[in-house]
Image: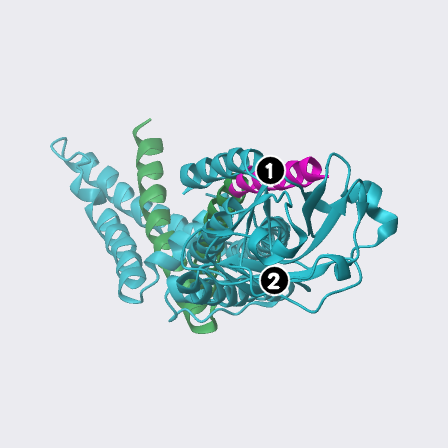
Amino acid sequence: MRGPHLGAGIVVASVLLAVVAAGPAAAQTVDPADEAEICPGTSGDSLVVVLPGDTYVRPGGDATLLPGTEAEIALCSDGGVVSTTAWPVDGGINGVTVGESERFSYPVTVEAVEGPTPVEFAPAIGQRGDVATPTVTAAPGNVTTIGVGGSTYRVAVAADNRDRLRRANNSYTETRNGMRTAAADLAENAGRLDPAPDIPDDRRLPQINRTRAVTTNYSTIQSRLFNAAANGDTGAVAALDAYERQHNDALGETRDSLETANRAIERQARSTALGVLGDLLGVALAGAVVGGIGGRVLTDRILSQVEIDRRRSSAVDFRPKHLAVQLGVAVVLVAGAVALVVTQGLLDPLVAVIRAVIGV
Amino acid sequence: MRKPLLAAIAVGAALAAVGSVGAQGDAASLAALVDGTQRGLGRLAAVQVAAGDSNLNVVRGVGGLAGVGLGIAVGSVATYVRWRR
């Protein structure tokens, strides 16, 4: 998943350096006091498109605008803005909707278009005569609002992608928050856990084990926002940045909680295992003392008898069979212990006990 | 005024792209952490099975049987070895 996103980011950065673009946001009302910013570099009658963020597109410049973008058009003449009474807009302008005139500008909103559509200003202001205009293109897309954290961002996405973006955003937010909350709960309660042994491991942490869903949804969101950013959507870039911060923060908090929980779980398992192992070895040690004394007494008796018999006959000597009874009893007892472990289902628990104690 | 906007867009997009690589890595390490947590909980559950009251008595019984058996074996062999000397 890394390559495509990094590649897309580089492409986005390259494309954005090459074209003029603006995302959906509102422009500010033109004021004659700003004409020094609006009109420089123009000559004669020049139509200027005022975009959000004090961005101006003058004759000779070009801009690709997305549906929903709100801008203004102003007329500069000899370095000053001209009152709208002097340049009425007659009829519509292809690709944009023209609003009620302000004193020195007309508000325009980019319409939804099927494909890249040139916005022709000149015919609509034909009464003014020869007016130089910038090259403006309306690009297809739809504006939607997505919430990231406590903020909302207006993003231009194609209609068929809008629902997918919203679904991915909702699912991403839900799963990410679920993971974070569950991890925090686990960290808080890990020292008092009493996990039911009949629950399979893969179901033990259903809320936390949703990393795949979070990653998939995040990739979907990034992909859609990258596409929007490639079309010059500043809202998409801001949303990407906000997602990045939220995502990193959420994953960081989840990771911290899980690390805390893991340490608590490990401590609890080790403490419990030491208790079990202490019981096992303590009783085994006591049993070994008793068994050792018993084995010695029994063997001493047998050996004493062998010595007595040897005094009567040199053919008598100690043979391995004289230890057979003791060793046979020992084998039976150890085998009984092993059988008890297996039949009582304690093999895995005892292995877990040993592993918890030695920490592997 | 156009260039600062473009530069901001480009830098933002590039940072987001680079950041996404780190985010993917973070997600992978988080998944590994989740797996570790599941294993830890599984081990804790197994240990707690052994520590349960009834099972703990069985564990003690196992220790006793094995201890006595090994004690008999060691005690007998040690006594024999000493006798042979």
Q: Could you tell whether A121 is left or right of A32 in the image?
A: left
Q: Position of residue A121 (x, y in %)?
A: 58, 53
Say which element carries label 1: helix
Tag 2 subunit: A
Based on the displayed image, in which of its 4 quarters is residue B11 positioned? top right
Q: Position of residue A268 (x, y in %)?
A: 57, 58
Residue in front for this viewpoint, A98 or A305? A98
Residue in front for this viewpoint, B42 or A154? A154
Let me know if residue B19 is in the magenta part.
yes
Q: Quadrant of the C terminus of chain A?
A: top left
Chain displayed in cyan: A
The correct choice, above or below, for A64 with respect to A344 in the image is above
Residue identified by numbered label 2: A109
- Using the rendered image of the protein, determine whether residue A205 is visible from the camera's viewpoint: no
Residue identified by numbered label 1: B10
Residue in front for this viewpoint, A29 or A298? A29
The correct choice, above or below, for A321 with respect to A90 in the image is above
The single residue placed furthest to the left in the displayed view is A315
Say which element carries label 2: strand
Chain displayed in green: B
| Mark 1 burial class by Cα count in 10 Å: few <14, some 14-19, many 20+ | many
Based on the displayed image, in which of its 4 quarters is residue A93 positioned? bottom right
Q: Position of residue A328 (x, y in %)?
A: 21, 50
Q: Quadrant of the N terminus of chain A?
A: top left
What predominant SS class does the magenta segment belong to? Answer: helix
Instruction: Identify the residue at image location x=36%, y=32%.
Output: B82
The correct choice, above or below, for A267 with respect to A312 in the image is below
Distance in Å between CA atoms under marks 2 and 1:
25 Å
Q: Give the residue type at disc 2.
A: Thr
Q: Which residues are magenta?
A: B1-20
